Amino acid sequence: MTVAPTSQLQGETLFRQGRFQDAVQSLQDEYRGGRKTFAVITLLIQSMRALGQHREMADFLAKAVMESSLSMPEQAALYYQLGQSLFQAKDMTQAKQAFWQAHRLNPNHPGLAEKLKVIGQRELRPQHRYSLLVSRNLLTEDQLAEMTQAAKEASEDLDQYLLRGLKLDKAVLGESLAAFYEVPFVAFDPNIDAPFELLEKRKLDPDYLKRSGWTPLAVDGNSIIVLMANPFDHARLDEIRFIFGTSRIEPKVALALDIQGFIDLFYRSLGSEELMELGDSMEAQTDDEAEAGLDEETGVSDSEVVRLVNALLVEAWRRNASDIHIEPDPQNRFCTVRFRIDGSCHEFRKIRAGMAKPLISRIKIMAHLNIAERRLPQDGKIKMRLPELGKIVEFRVAILPTIENHEDVVLRVLASGKPLPLERLGMSDENLAKFKSSVYKPYGLIIVVGPTGSGKTTTLHSAISYINTPERKIWTAEDPVEITQEGLRQVQINPKIGLDFATTLRSFLRADPDVIMIGEMRDAETAHIGVQASLTGHLVFSTLHTNSAPETITRLLDMDLDPFNFADSLLCVVAQRLIKTLCSHCKEAYGPDQQEVDDLAREFGPGFDQYIPMSRDISLYRAKGCGQCNHGYRGRTGVHELMTSSTQIKNLIKRRSHTEEIRDQAVADGMLALKQDALLKVLQGFTDMAQVRLVSGW
């Protein structure tokens, strides 16, 4: 949820003054102007309710739910308010419908169960799967009978027949199914992780699952979530309870065709023939002589190992994993494969112990490493092509010896990608405007800082993409080249042959550059040359491993940079982290207590009140977990600390001032700290406090 800005408070003020008609007019103007937030909609409904405009409330709410991006708990809260108003107006029929909508969206909404009991919950129950479509005039009972017969004659699934014949959105049909079965609807999503443990442990046959119309989806605490085409099939539910040996089965409804899609997806991920065939289609350069030695050494089928490795690499790429970890068990019981996705490691699967050494040997062959060396670390690269997708995927390989004569392998996925637009980096409007202004300068130094994996390269390429025009000559030195752009001349650093950042940077200065990107200022020599380049009419971008923007100044001065040259060259420093974002399908709104709001205000520091309503009546969100995400989070966004080089900052650099003095001046110039930017994203509903604590150490 986006917290309403201060300018929205005119309608709130009118409401508190009892000027309800004026409040309605003001808030409607806000809504039509694009402020379709929970706060605006709530105030508008309360104002209409005070005026007794029950029918207007119902009409507006139906429109608002469709037009705004409200969470399910927020929608439930609004329908509950509407139901209360209609109930007081003794419009029982409409009140029932409003309370039923609230119940479907959030069965645990406070006070809802009691209201349903009072007005008779049984009367609200839809008569069949498509009752909601009928009540919305999307379908008549006569049409339903005709289409049911037509689908039967055509041997076609009725749900698919209705979707096509009525030109329905799948979500609308899903809403009707959810209302009838009183369980959540789950649509097919290729990004949902396969429930490996449930599928493998019970040896579930995919053909059986398709015939039976169900599939396990995930484990949620002590419960097992299953998708069913008919959650009222009690015999099937008993069968599922028997299979998993537990009564804690949580059914959800899905279209039959989507269930089949999930089953195919899950079994491809498990290493089915379909996945293996895709693995076979990958092309990689290997050493034939070493390949022959693999079979002799391990006794495992060569083709079996090749297919397994290719399947693992394909699946990691499909899941947007950044790293693959292959970890043999010291007791030789199994070998664990984990993927790092959105910054966290998740177990992909366990393979039998006998496959560990052949698997690692195959990776060594593909990376042109010494297959016989098991005592020392080795580094290499694998480049593979997916012909049917036209994709080249590169993997950076690190092999380390571990106890009991084993080796661990970590592969970093370096799939060539395109730069993100600056607007999608997650910067606040103020930071984005300042950053764009710096990036568009003709010369100077821009530094992006943060730990490994914080998105520095993505930010640099987004900035360069913003100014990448035919009029500019742009050179980049990177290790490795992860993102490619048309119009850039990109150089891959190779320290083994003496091609380091400093050497490459000197060469760039003789190659008529307008813009230079240095992957990292690893040493004093590179930093000195970068500053000199920025003072001689070039725009220079680079990165550094520091924790904050002010600390970066101190670190570079410690490299013996001339403080006057450095101060004159610096345009801005951006410190950043990546933070997990809440799943938009299941994030749960709640009202924080006064203590939590006070803690937020204290941690944020001065200026907190300008970002929240005057009443401090705010909603926060927390992770819940659903079929779309499994653990409550989906994707990541950036949190930023942007320090521009004002006159005062330049003077502090020239005096070699301490980090604390520089930080104080940057804050006075308008800089928000990393933690403050993260807290704003909590207030805006993008993430939660748990993730802020991970990023900021609070």
Image: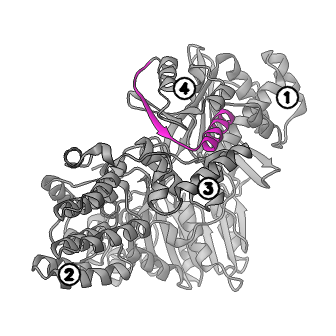
Q: Where is 575 relative to 9, above or below?
A: above
Mark 2 to mark 1 CA distance (whole Å): 78 Å
Mark 1 crowd level (few <14, some 14–19, many ≥20, 10 Å Cα): some
Which one is in front in this view, the residue at disc 2 or the one at disc 1? 2
Labels 4 & 1 near each other (Cβ < 8 A): no
Mark 4 crowd level (few <14, some 14–19, many ≥20, 10 Å Cα): some
Labels 1 & 3 near each other (Cβ < 8 A): no
Nearer to us in this view, 353 or 380:
353
Nearer to us in this view, 259 or 173:
173
- Residue 94: image x %, image y %? 30, 61
Amino acid residing under circle 4: Glu
- Left-right relation of 359 to 674: right
The part of the chain drawn in magenta is 246-269
Helix, strand or loop at mark 1: helix
Label annotation for residue 163? 3
Residue drawn at point x = 69 percent, y = 50 percent: 150
Labels 2 & 3 near each other (Cβ < 8 A): no
Q: Is tag 4's residue or tag 2's residue first in the polypeptide sequence?
A: 2
Q: How many marks?
A: 4
Q: Quadrant of residue 650?
A: bottom left
Mark 3 to mark 4 CA distance (whole Å): 34 Å
Q: Which residue is mark 1?
A: 290
